Amino acid sequence: MSDHLQNEETGSLSEQAYRHILSGILSARLAAGTPIQERRLAAEIGLSRSPLRDALGRLAGEGLLVRGNTGALTIRAISLSDYLQSLDMRALVEPSAAALAARAIGEDDLQRLDAGLSSLEAEADPSREALAAFDDDLHGTIASRSGNPFMERVLSEMRRYTTLYESQTGRRPLRNADGPEHRNLLTALTSRNPEDAAEAMRQHLEGIRRRILERF
């Protein structure tokens, strides 16, 4: 096998390992403070340890793994301070992303988002999975349609801290508490109004912060 093909295969296997471990971290299946056992993980995923170590290095670089007292990599525990600071970063970036997206978002995106939100609004008690899926779609679409890859990367990383905190602590927002704010945001995007979109996002992020602090 040529070096090029070997590197390509290693990269693909590393991505597979990365996504597997990331899913375990975000769902709290891999609990905060859990030491990473390379041999067990490699066997679980069905990979050699070389691509696994590449994936672990990537996750450590993203701040999701940290070195414990023994020097072993462990799952990072996200504190309330981490969570609030990630919201602060989102508040600096995401309103601008929403303003940019209001100019560029496609009709297919708007129709999909409207259908998803309308479905949630029609349910008396939508599942957490359905709410999370729509939230990811809305915020991910806004970040993507901003047209700024730096914004998109920062927002993706900051939203991971939100997800991880809620998974680790069990302090999830009340069901569909975000619904009216999501509707305001989608209305502003549909109207192609950058100022309204930025303000709707700003109010949404303030609402998230307020609701999590009310639960302490």
Image (spheres, rainbow, N blue to C red):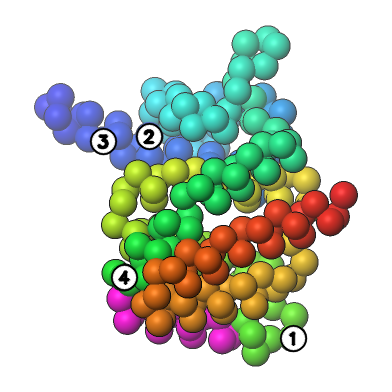
Residue receiving disc 3: 9
Type of amino acid at the residue the image marks with label 2: Ser
Give the Cα separation between the discs numbered 3 and 1. Answer: 47 Å
Magenta-span inclusion, residue 33: no
Rendered image: mark on residue 172: none
Region of the chain picked out in magenta, as a range: 106-119
For marks 2 and 3 on the same chain, the one whose residue lies earlier in the sequence: 3
- Report the amino acid beneath label 3: Glu
- In the image, residue 209 sits, relative to residue 11, either above or below, namely below
Residue 213 appears anywhere in the view: yes
| Cα–Cα span, label 2 and label 4 | 36 Å
Q: Give the SS element for disc 1.
A: loop
Q: Distance between the residues labelled 1 and 4?
A: 33 Å
The Cα–Cα distance between marks 4 and 3, rounded to whole angstroms, is 39 Å
The residue tagged 1 is 124
Q: What residue type is labelled 1?
A: Ala
Outermost residue to the right: 216
Q: Give residue 139's position: percent from left, percent from top.
A: 49, 62
Q: What element carries label 4?
A: helix
Residue named by callout 2: 14
Q: Is mark 2 on a helix, strand or loop?
A: helix
Q: Mark 4 or 3 closer to N-term?
A: 3
Contact? badges 1 and 2 (CB < 8 Å): no
Q: Name the residue under label 4.
A: 103
Percent from the top left, x then y, of residue 127? 69, 73
Residue pictured at 70% horizontal, 54% vertical: 209
